[in-house]
């Protein structure tokens, strides 16, 4: 059972998401909050597996809220669910620790699929967001990564799970883990989202 909490200030959207989560097999809606202040105060009582987070919220922004949640509860995945498609906001959300980034016109099944993906080690993004990020990259000559490490990082940026990366590159999952460990070391990061953010910022793939 995947416990999902929602931070969304639009009453209709918040209620619709809660109903969607509770109606889906293998999911439960742990909480639904109107703002980050309320979420941060209450979340410690029963940290969820995944938080669906809006960006534009009254008071503390969704990006700042994400950073605070990840600092206190590193095992909780945060998926941004927003109307915003701006490159800078995507980068800031990933840097804050978001594991995925979906736009609000994503269908119900895509939202549920994204929650499953983050719990399986993926980093789901709406197709147009992922395409925008990947197409904006220009590989730099100063990249510390090997060709294979760059390929693995590019797949991470597309939101692929370790298993999917292994299948795409025709290598074992153990080899994927080995390359990702080296990527983390070379980029001085400690998580998938931080590696993706670094790739976006430094144009490494």
Image: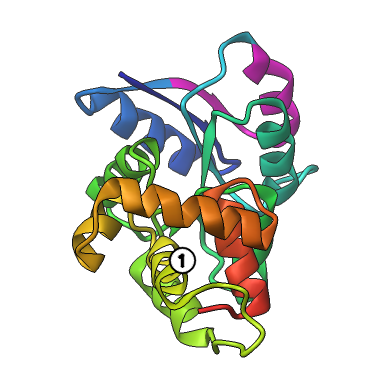
Classify 39 as above or below 177: above
Q: Nearer the viewer, residue 122 or 84?
A: 122
Q: Nearer the viewer, residue 179 or 195?
A: 179
- The magenta segment: 30-44
| Residue occupying the point 66% across, 62% down | 187
Quarter of the image where one finds residue 115: top left
Give coordinates of residue 2: x percent, y percent: 35, 24
Instruction: Kindly report the secondary structure that dominates the magenta region of the rendered protein.
Output: helix
Q: Looking at the image, can residue 122 be seen?
A: yes
Query: What colour scheme does the image use?
Result: rainbow
Q: Residue furthest top?
A: 45
Classify 93 as above or below 144: above
- Disc 1: which residue: 153
Give coordinates of residue 131: x percent, y percent: 40, 78
Residue 72 placement, left or right of 146 = right
Q: Nearer the viewer, residue 178 or 85?
A: 178
Give coordinates of residue 176: x percent, y percent: 36, 53
């Amino acid at each position: 059972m995947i416990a999902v909490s929602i931070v969304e200030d639009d009453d209709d959207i918040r209620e619709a998401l809660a109903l969607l989560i509770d109606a889906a097999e293998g999911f439960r809606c742990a909480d639904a909050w109107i703002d980050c202040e309320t979420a941060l105060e209450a979340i410690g009582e029963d940290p969820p597996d995944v938080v669906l987070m809006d960006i534009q919220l009254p008071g503390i922004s969704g990006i700042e809220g994400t950073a605070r949640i990840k600092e206190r509860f590193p095992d909780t995945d945060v998926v941004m669910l927003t109307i915003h498609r701006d490159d800078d906001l995507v980068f800031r959300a990933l840097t804050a620790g978001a594991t995925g980034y979906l736009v609000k016109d994503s269908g119900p099944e895509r939202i549920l699929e994204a929650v499953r993906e983050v719990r399986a080690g993926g980093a789901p993004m709406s197709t147009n967001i992922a395409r925008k990020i990947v197409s904006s990259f220009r590989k730099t000559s100063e990249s510390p990564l090997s060709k294979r490490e760059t390929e693995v990082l590019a797949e991470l940026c597309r939101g692929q799970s370790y298993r999917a990366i292994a299948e795409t590159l025709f290598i074992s999952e153990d080899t994927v883990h080995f390359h990702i460990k080296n990527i983390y070391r070379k980029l001085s990061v400690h998580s998938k989202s931080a590696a993706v953010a670094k790739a976006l910022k430094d144009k490494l793939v």
